Amino acid sequence: MSKWILRSVVSLLTLLLIVILAFRGAAFHRETVPFAAGLPDEGRLLETTEGSFFILETGSAENPRVLFAHGTAAWSAIWRETMYELSKADYFASAFDMPPFGWSEYPDGNDFDRSTQADRVIALLETLDDNPIIVAHSVGAGPVSEAVLRRPDLVTGFVIVAGAIGLSDRDNSKQPPVVLRNSVLREYLTAATASNPLLTRKFLRDFMHRDDTATPDVVEVLQEPIVREGYTRAVSNWIPELFTTPDHAVSLKPTAWSALDLPVALIWGANDTVTPVSQGKELASLVPNSTLTIMKDVGHIPHLEAPADFSAELVFVLNRMTQPHKEERE
């Protein structure tokens, strides 16, 4: 019996190895588009001191800019519907791709920690040089928060949407699981999971309360950049940061949030199981004069799960933030 069990385990491990190798091979053959090729027609690359960023823009540049940052495995196009609604409300809506996702340039090194990502956001804001209101979702809110807290002079306001900032981790530091600490093994696992197009819809639905909104069209949009050269490797280099507490980050310090002198609005889904509403409430309690909106029957991705309601709420908070500036122009 013991030999039978041993043979079964060996067979299972062999099959698993073959499957993982197959997915890595599939990724290698899929990822053929070089940097700056195959870009979506409506976007452009913007050179900064921290590399080239891909950005989408909608509306008149004479209006106040609202700059969007996406979350895990997404890219700027995830905001298209929201951007269109904002442009109708007299805003210049922009969105950028946060490396390693989307079409922005992959950094030369493998450093994706929160501080380094914040450096990239700061470089982008300095290049734009128009003090936008910045809107950040989920994991994107981590480096954006770090950038805003370090350089609040570069923005006019800050909207956090279901932000994965990790304040609750400051007293319980986390490190990546052992299996993810080997770069070679991690790359093969990434090919079988995070960069595997067969799992895009499943992962998206896992983040949602209204999972029927994970439509084939949305999935197709999310999958567009996975054909880039080196996509799996870049995502693999980023993944440890998803499991690491940025212990020295300013954005984990409650005193930094309490000292923030900017208009801040928080928008959360009541049914968010990824970043529960309690995290939004904690942030709201720290930031002076901030507002917290909780959307009913919505999970972690409000702009996909309830796009019309989300856009209406966002326009409302943006109007409140920009009203003094609009009055000055008039």
Image: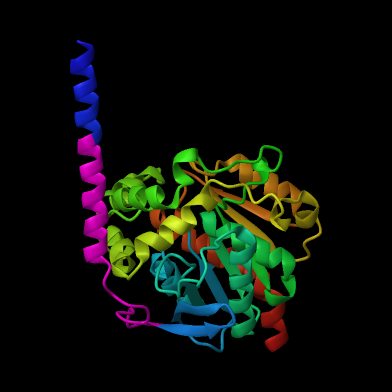
Q: Position of residue 74 (x, y in %)?
A: 41, 61
Look at the picture and state if 283 lies above or below 15. Answer: below
Q: Position of residue 273 (x, y in %)?
A: 49, 39
Q: Kindly tell me whether residue 216 is visible in this rendering.
A: no
In the image, farthest residue toward the top: 1
Which is more toward the observer, 317 or 232? 232
What colouring style does the render use?
rainbow
Asked if the magenta segment contains residue 195, the reply would be no
> What residue range appears in magenta?
14-43
Rendered residue at 75%/54% (across/down): 287
Rendered residue at 61%/55% (across/down): 266
Rendered residue at 61%/51% (across/down): 165
Rendered residue at 64%/59% (across/down): 265
Left or right side of 135 for 5: left
* Quarter of the rendering containing residue 321: bottom right
Which is more toward the observer, 317 or 246? 246
Which is more toward the observer, 200 or 191? 191
In the image, farthest residue toward the front: 3
Look at the picture and state if 39 lies above or below 320. Answer: below
Left or right side of 18 for 184: right
Q: Kindly tell me whether residue 65 is visible in this rendering.
A: yes
Q: Position of residue 31 (x, y in %)?
A: 28, 67
Circle count: 0
Look at the picture and state if 100 lies above or below 240. Answer: below
| Quadrant occupied by the C terminus | bottom right
Asked if the magenta segment contains residue 33, the reply would be yes
